[in-house]
Amino acid sequence: RYYTNDTIGTGVAGNSTPGDSPSELNAPKGIAVDQYGAIIVADSSNYRIQRFPLGSTVGTTLAIDSTTNILGQVRDLHINVNNEIFVTDSDYSHVIKYYPNNGVGVTFSRQLWIRLSSKSVVRPIWKFRRWK
């Protein structure tokens, strides 16, 4: 985190060492901040989603790859005003929605396709985009 006029950042998630303990991340790909100030991280190479409460560098696992929750390499993460988390999973080519306090995701889309304009071709996209 960088505050106004800071030249040195402050670590707010993880401990700068790749790993799979609650205080470590391995190839984080997406980040969001929920309405309580907690940092939500797509911990891609650990196949999990971590939540770091405001002021803590120790995370709790919100979701992890398991037989009941198929979660591969997460490439992006978005959280909405209802604290619902959406992740793009490039290993299984789908978008998963997680409801608050529920570690089992719902497949929202098997493959996400967009049309950039009426004359363009349709192509797959694996990052969330905000449209004006």
Image (cartoon, helix red, strand yellow):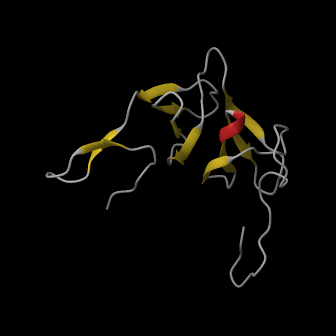
- Between 29 and 99, the one lying in front of the other is 29
Q: Residue at x 55, y 32 (%)?
A: 99
Q: Is residue 72 left or right of residue 120?
A: right
- Between 108 and 123, the one lying in front of the other is 123
Q: Position of residue 132 (x, y in %)?
A: 31, 62
Q: Residue at x 58, y 39 (%)?
A: 74
- Residue lying furthest top in this view? 67
Vertical position of residue 18 compared to residue 21: above or below: below
Q: Position of residue 2 (x, y in %)?
A: 71, 73
Q: Residue at x 71, y 41 (%)?
A: 50
Q: Position of residue 126 (x, y in %)?
A: 44, 43
- Residue lying furthest left in this view? 119
Q: Residue at x 55, y 26 (%)?
A: 105
Q: Position of residue 77 (x, y in %)?
A: 55, 45
Q: Dividing the picture into quarters, in which one does residue 108 lie?
A: top left
Q: Dividing the picture into quarters, in which one does residue 49 lie?
A: top right
